[in-house]
Amino acid sequence: MNLPAKYAKNTKKKSLLFFAFFACFAGQIFLASCSSNEQKPTSNMSAAREAKKERKELRDAIKKIEPFFQPMGKPEAYDWLGSHNEPGQTFDEYLDTDPTKPTKERQKIYVLPLGTFTPQQKKVIETASAYLSVFYDLPVEELPGKAIPQKLGAKDGRFNEYLKTRQVRTGFIMDSLLKPDLPKDAAALIAFTNEDLYPDETMSFVFGQASFADRVGVWSLRRLQMQADGQKFLQRTLKIAAHETGHMFSMWHCTKYECVMSGTNHIAETDRRPIDACPECMAKIAWLSDIEPATRYKNLAEFCRKNGLLKRSGRIRPQGRGFASVAEARTK
Ligand SMILES: [Zn+2]
Ligand SMILES: [Zn+2]
């Protein structure tokens, strides 16, 4: 989750890229509509009415679930918002950015295991894939695993003295291992690795990094597993997977609530964050996935029940309970 330093820096550039993509996409729709005749104004009008109705319904849904969520508090020392002055992004502001969303042609999330893993890590990747499918209501496919070369160029790998381990440069992974194999129908390609990562010489490590324009990203499990039992390791991985995929769909950091889309500066802050998206971010997800919020909450509660996320594990909060409470309240 600490890719935001880079994310914040590149927001403007990325917005432009998203804009370029959507201008092109809208152009295709326009050309297609020109090829047919007078039915179009009516259908355009009814599509606009439908869109307006959908937005109104989502705004109503935001209001209904607000009581279940905790507004963002004052940042603690070293927290993300203590050193990053971010504007946040409401549902309406999100829609105003012409966000990148899955399309009919690109609606699958691909998950790629990179390198070798323990059986526990393999299971966590499998669960994270299933979580993404429910969280974004999109098909998810796990690709056959791929190796990271043992020998790396001087600019693509280095040795970390603190962990006594090799580190791999994220740009190398994205450019050389992910981009060439990006499936045509990919809404996003997410790679997990057990290697420690770094973005460039200025930083000692990074949990992960994504290229929003190229729809690829890589995240390391290595530091997520440090000082964590199985349940905490799983929760951290689910949070990272949902957060980073949200960025790939143009969602900015959330500052209004304690939210899975809020930026985090360190692992303790990640642990404090909920696994859930706040009302504003929920509306963005329901809009981009075209799913009814109550159905999504029901599916998420079911997922959490199946994966032990409703039960307390030691001192770890049962994070799936938020989904369950909302699902229950909304389906009564
Ligand atoms: Zn982020
Ligand atoms: Zn949020």
Image: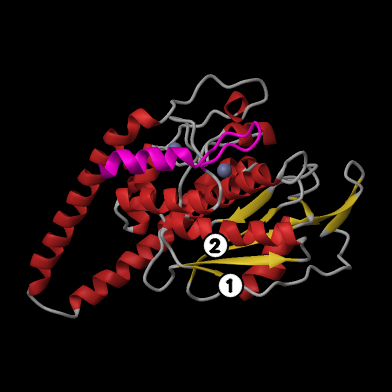
Q: Which residue is mark 2?
A: 215
- Camera-nearest residue between 82 and 193: 193
> On the rendering, which quadrant does ligand 2 occupy?
top left
Name the foreground residue: 194 vs 167: 194
Q: Is residue 32 magenta?
A: no
Q: Is residue 148 above or below residue 60?
A: below
Q: Position of residue 329 (x, y in %)?
A: 30, 38
Q: Is residue 88 left or right of residue 288?
A: right
Residue type at tag 2:
Arg
* Picture quarter with the C terminus: top left
Q: Is mark 1 within 8 Å of ligand 1?
A: no
* Residue depicted at x 51% and y 54%: 306
Q: Are marks 1 and 2 in contact (CB under 8 Å)?
A: yes
Q: CA distance from mark 1 to mark 2?
A: 8 Å
Q: Residue at x 34, y 28 (%)?
A: 67
| Rendered image: mark on residue 182 | 1
**243 vs 87: above or below:** below
Question: Which residue type does callout 1 highlight?
Answer: Leu
Q: Residues within 10 Å of mark 1 (few under 14, many from 20)?
A: some
Q: Position of residue 272 (x, y in %)?
A: 59, 31
Labelled disc at residue 79? none
Q: Is residue 323 left or right of residue 243?
A: left
In the image, what residue occupies the spot 72% across and 72% down?
Answer: 146
Instruction: Examine the rendering and report whether any part of residue 236 can be seen.
Output: yes
Within 10 Å of disc 2 (Cα), the crowding (few <14, some 14-19, many 20+) is many
Quarter in which the N terminus is drawn: top right
Q: Is residue 297 left or right of residue 48?
A: right
* Image coords of residue 21 (percent x, y): 42, 62
Secondary element at tag 1: loop
Q: Is residue 328 magenta?
A: yes
In the image, which residues are magenta? 310-332
Q: Disc 2 on helix, strand or loop?
A: loop
